[in-house]
Amino acid sequence: FLRSLAFNVCFTGWALLASVIFAPLFIISAGAAQMSGRPWAAGCLFLAKHILGLTYEIRGQKYLTYQPVIYASKHQSAWDTIIFLILFRSPAYVLKRELLHIPGWGWYLWRMRMIAIDRTGGSASVKQMIRQAKEALGDRRPIIIYPEGTRTRPGAEPRYHPGTAALYSMLHVPVIPVALNSGCFWGKNAFQKKPGKVIIEFLPPIEPGMDRDEFNRTLQTAIETASLKLLTEAQEK
């Protein structure tokens, strides 16, 4: 409990401090603001390692690329939103528009030109998402999307939304599935975190050309099968 308390206090304090430190980058330009993501994320992982005893391992690094690509990731924890800022330069996250309304943090998301969507907007929202995603790929920014749209408990029944398939069919770039087991250590809205090792695994890319139904089946099978294996691995330690 004390470790989690110390981490949560330091995590919040670092977020407030970072928002002040990187304010000049926020003012200069969107590109400059995007540079603030990696040092902020590095600070978060430093705190997790040295206060919680929570480290991580990356598998499937051969599938990481600087070519135009979409990373479709399992989403179990806030940890999942941090790690991609370490692995990639200026990733473009697909996220819900409500996050832009968070004072301070939401302003950075807006300035960093994340792909914010209105989940009640129907086809108009999908068109806007595709347009912003094309712009991001044109700027050589990888796209990060969570197919389930929200954090889920490890082992919970998956429910994949159509946004990933829409991007896949319209952008004609590979989609790289990403499995992980972060929720075993840092749960959704959980005050208490656990020591251990998060594993994030990048899987073989799904090349363009499938129809939507085939793509959805392939993507879900890849992510869920690998994530369940990582869950079992975490439980056995």
Image (cartoon, helix red, strand yellow):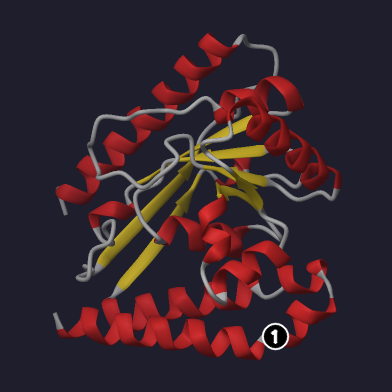
Of 113 and 197, which appears nearest the observer? 113
* Position in image of residue 174 (x %, y %): 68, 28
- The kind of residue tagged 1 is Ala
The picture quadrant where one finds residue 87 is: bottom right
Could you tell me which residue is drawn at 79 percent across and 67 percent down? 30
Q: 179 above or below 191?
A: above
Q: 24 above or below 168?
A: below
* Position in image of residue 74 (x %, y %): 42, 41
Of 164 and 229, which appears nearest the observer? 164
Of 120 and 110, which appears nearest the observer? 120
* Position in image of residue 110 (x %, y %): 67, 63
Q: Is residue 4 left or right of residue 114?
A: left
Could you tell me which residue is drawn at 46 percent across and 28 percent down? 161
Of 79 and 237, which appears nearest the observer? 79
Report which residue position mark 1 lands on. 23
Q: Is residue 33 left or right of residue 99?
A: right
Could you tell me which residue is drawn at 42 percent across and 36 percent down? 148
Callout 1: few (<14), some (14-19), or many (20+) C-alpha neighbours within 10 Å?
some
Could you tell me which residue is drawn at 79 percent across and 38 percent down? 134
Looking at the rendered structure, the secondary structure element under dot 1 is helix
Give the total number of marks visible in the rendering. Answer: 1
Specify the quadrant that holds the C terminus: bottom left
* Position in image of residue 186 (x %, y %): 28, 62
Specify the quadrant that holds the N terminus: bottom left
Q: 199 above or below 175?
A: below
The picture quadrant where one finds residue 51 is: bottom left
